[in-house]
Image (tube, rainbow, N blue to C red):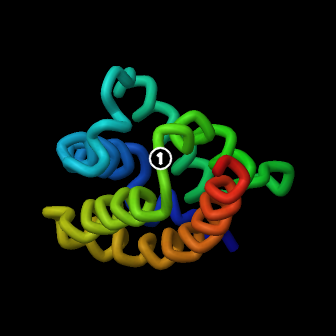
Amino acid sequence: MYTKTLFENIGGDATLEAAIEDFYCHVVVDPILSPFFEGINMGRLKNHQRRFFEMAFTRIPAIIDVSKVLIEKHAHLFDDSLNEKHFDKVFRHFVDTLHTSRNDCQRKRYCWSSSFCVYRRRQALSAITSAVTVHH
């Protein structure tokens, strides 16, 4: 029996694309977060984010250490004072994006996926806490 992946349940590529676009519209104008996005190639960043969520919403391979990847990808930002407060703001924007979908069907799927995000957030928060401790 085939069980749909979380990625399929939230609506696949189109839904993920729309969510990422909406998410970054909010993040880049947030006064606390916007400095971290100055001079960033947003197309490239959105593409990375899309690939990450496609993987996260299907199955993260056992060989990938999510905490390590988060630390490596954000290491340069820790020198610019990235901390848990910023991570919480980003996470809040992401959850808000998922919950404000205009399509009722998509919203239900998004709400379901947000519980997955809470689980991943706990893992990521540990990684960021470790990185902040190591870098400061």
Tell me the residue that label 1 is attached to: 81
The residue most toward the left is 102
Locate residue 21: give its quadrant: top left
Locate residue 2: give its quadrant: bottom right
Closest to the observer: 1 or 114? Answer: 114
Closest to the observer: 87 or 60? Answer: 87
The residue most toward the front is 136
Task: Report whether 75 appears left or right of 20.
Answer: right
Q: Residue at x 30, y 37 (%)?
A: 35
Q: Is residue 110 above or below residue 71?
A: below
Amino acid type at mark 1 = Ser
Q: Residue at x 26, y 66 (%)?
A: 96
The secondary structure type at the circle numbered 1 is loop
Where's residue 7, x and y in %? Answer: 50, 58
**In which quadrant will I find the N terminus?**
bottom right
Q: Is residue 46 above or below residue 120?
A: above
Where's residue 28, x and y in %? Answer: 25, 40
Q: Does the image show residue 14?
A: no
Locate residue 25: give its quadrant: top left
Task: Report whether 49 appears left or right of 128.
Answer: left
Task: Report whether 41 appears left or right of 28.
Answer: right
Q: Residue at x 34, y 42 (%)?
A: 17
Q: Residue at x 47, y 46 (%)?
A: 81
**Crowding at label 1, few (<14), some or many (≥20) Cα neighbours within 10 Å?**
few
Task: Report whether 25 appears left or right of 71.
Answer: left
Where's residue 5, x and y in %? Answer: 58, 63
Q: Does the image show residue 120?
A: yes
